[in-house]
């Protein structure tokens, strides 16, 4: 059973471009979470999704950031018009259900030039 | 609002020593608490999950305890090895939600 998969592992964008980060949960998992780890800071929750539904987006910045988890395919975290402050490691996690262990992917390291 | 604190921020021990990592949280209305390890430049590996109704969990040389009344959890590592060197993260759910609130971690170095 493959773990949580994220791609790309590294992404370089120039200011103003768009970044698309993909996450494939573990097989059988329908709950997906996105977290961000800024340099020298701890991990911060961004959003919690189930298939086709956003359950909790209380950690998402109000502008430029969006997330989806369609019926088919991976979950996508989209950052429009990136700025240097968006440079961070973005981690996706998945779980089998509520109150279950969250398993993390290897992360996507975004660098904005 | 849940806040998670980990002490110490860094710890260096000789190989073979038993050690304890500490985690405290402010909101006791948690679903569960998880311990992870993170190696440099890598993702998080889940070590142990303790449900709110449990007092401890064990996996191999690791034992995690949970005391909701005092807002504390400890991770005990027996007979430490150089391969245990990593940053250990504690994360508690925020009351009534699935989101994990992380501490800043304890960076452990086990010297051969």
Image (cartoon, rainbow, N blue to C red):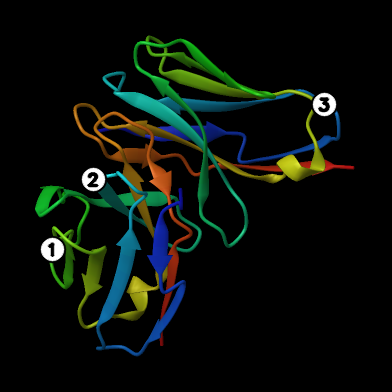
Query: Circle 3 is placed at which residue position?
Result: B17
Q: In which quarter of the image is the C terminus of chain B?
A: top right
Q: Which chain carries label 2?
A: A
Tell me, yes or no, whether dots 1 and 3 are on the same chain. no
Cα separation between marks 3 and 2:
41 Å
Nearer the observer: mark 2 or 1; the answer is 2
How far apart are the alpha carbons under marks 2 and 1?
25 Å
Q: Label for residue A81? A: none
Figure label count: 3
Q: Which percent across, then down, holds residue B78? A: 74, 23
Q: Mark 1 points at which residue?
A: A62
Marks 1 and 3, how far apart at CA = 47 Å
- Mark toward the viewer: 3 or 2: 2
Q: Residues at badges 3 and 2 in contact (C-beta under 8 Å)?
A: no
Q: How crowded is mark 1: few (under 14 residues within 10 Å), some or many (20 or more)?
A: few
Q: Which of marks 1 and 3 is in front?
A: 3
Residue A105 or residue A66, whichever sits in front: A105
Seen as rendered, the residue at the extreme left is: A53
x 46%, y 10%: residue: B55
Q: Mark 2 points at which residue?
A: A30
Q: In this view, does B76 lie to the left or right of A47?
A: right
> How far from the left and from the top, in percent, is residue A43?
41, 51
Pointer 3 local density, CA inside 10 Å: few below 14, some 14–19, many at least 20 = few
């Amino acid at each position: 059973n493959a773990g949580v998969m994220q791609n790309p592992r590294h992404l370089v964008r120039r200011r103003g471009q768009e970044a698309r980060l993909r996450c494939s949960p573990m097989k059988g998992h329908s709950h997906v979470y996105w977290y961000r780890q800024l340099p020298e800071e701890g991990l911060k929750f961004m959003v919690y999704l189930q298939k086709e539904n956003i359950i909790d987006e209380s950690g998402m910045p109000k502008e430029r950031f969006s997330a989806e988890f369609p019926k088919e395919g991976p979950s996508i975290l989209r950052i429009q018009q990136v700025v240097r402050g968006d440079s961070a490691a973005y981690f996706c996690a998945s779980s089998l259900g509520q109150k279950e262990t969250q398993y993390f992917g290897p992360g996507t390291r975004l660098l904005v030039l | 609002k849940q806040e998670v604190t980990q002490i110490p921020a860094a710890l260096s021990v000789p190989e073979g020593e038993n050690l304890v990592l500490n985690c405290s949280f402010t909101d006791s209305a948690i679903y569960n608490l998880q311990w992870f390890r993170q190696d440099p430049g890598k993702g998080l590996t889940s070590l142990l999950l303790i449900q709110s109704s449990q007092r401890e969990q064990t996996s191999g040389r690791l034992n995690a305890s949970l005391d909701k009344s005092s807002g504390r959890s400890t991770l005990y590592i027996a007979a430490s090895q150089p391969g245990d060197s990593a940053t250990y993260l504690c994360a508690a759910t925020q009351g009534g939600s699935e989101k994990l609130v992380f501490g800043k971690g304890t960076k452990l170095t086990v010297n051969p």
